[in-house]
């Protein structure tokens, strides 16, 4: 089981965001999180990524506690598709910097080159990301999340800034990685059709 969540809850002060959440997500499954804005979808992704902690309950990635060093190595994260890059660095250098944290030596450059080709980043790869459009930056952050062949991919509205062609590139990349478990937040109806399961928010005591 790639992702397992047991009786998870998150509160901000006295306000419950979600509670009683149980999930079992096998390898290769695409899980869509849908629901109104502010219902807790991004909060769940942040808890799974380890940037927030659950108020109660637990989650694991391939048997490792969510947020642990082992789980982080197995998790690709793209929570703010247009943000989170070093603006003065090019897309290529942002990717290479991230790749060197996951991969050794020539493997880092090889992985970056492959993703630049796959997501058609090459035409703007050497441009500082502060001069790139939101859609260009989103492609770079998606590529960064795919570095190192993660077991789990967390995507928060990755297509928000992508045009039709770039969205097709994203889904083609996911289709080539059929063993990759993906938890995706999206409001696009066509994304629901591409996912295996859906979980609607808010979640309170669902099993």
Image (cartoon, rainbow, N blue to C red):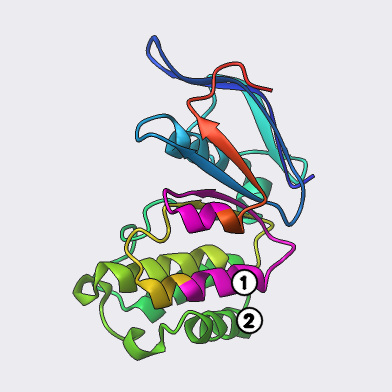
Residue under the image location 57 percent in, 78 percent down: 108
Q: Nearer the viewer, residue 193 or 142?
A: 193
Label 1: element kind: loop
In the picture, the disc for residue 107 is 2
Compare residues 157 and 81 and report the one nearer the observer: 157
Please tell me how crowded label 1 is: few (under 14), some (14-19), or many (20+) other residues with Cα within 10 Å. Answer: some
- Looking at the rendering, the stretch of residues picked out in magenta corresponds to 168-192
Q: Is residue 95 magenta?
A: no
Q: Residue furthest bottom?
A: 123
Q: Identify the residue under disc 1.
A: 103
Relative to 126, is 201 above or below?
Answer: above
Could you tell me how far apart the alpha carbons at marks 1 and 2 are, in whole angstroms?
A: 6 Å
Residue 21, x across and y down, in percent: 62, 24
Residue 65 in view of the camera: yes
Instruction: Evaluate if marks 1 and 2 touch, with contact meaning CB atoms under 8 Å apart.
Output: yes
Does dot 2 land on a helix, a strand or a loop?
Answer: helix
């Amino acid at each position: 089981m790639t992702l397992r969540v047991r009786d998870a809850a998150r509160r901000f002060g006295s306000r419950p965001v979600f509670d009683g959440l149980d999930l079992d997500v096998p390898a290769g499954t695409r899980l869509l999180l849908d629901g109104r804005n502010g219902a807790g979808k991004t909060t769940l992704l942040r808890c799974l990524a380890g940037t927030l902690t659950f108020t109660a309950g637990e989650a694991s990635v391939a048997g490792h506690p969510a947020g642990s060093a082992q789980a982080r190595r197995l998790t690709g994260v793209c929570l703010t598709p247009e943000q989170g890059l070093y603006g003065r660095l090019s897309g290529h250098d942002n990717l290479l910097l991230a790749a060197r944290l996951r991969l050794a030596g020539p493997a880092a450059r090889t992985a970056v080159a492959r993703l630049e080709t796959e997501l058609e980043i090459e035409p703007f790869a050497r441009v500082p990301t502060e001069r790139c459009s939101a859609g260009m930056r989103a492609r770079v952050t998606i590529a960064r999340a795919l570095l190192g062949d993660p077991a789990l991919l967390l995507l928060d509205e990755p297509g928000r800034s992508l045009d039709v062609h770039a969205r097709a590139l994203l889904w083609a990349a996911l289709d080539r990685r059929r063993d990759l478990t993906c938890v995706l937040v999206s409001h696009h109806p066509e994304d629901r059709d591409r996912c295996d399961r859906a979980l609607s928010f808010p979640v309170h005591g669902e099993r």
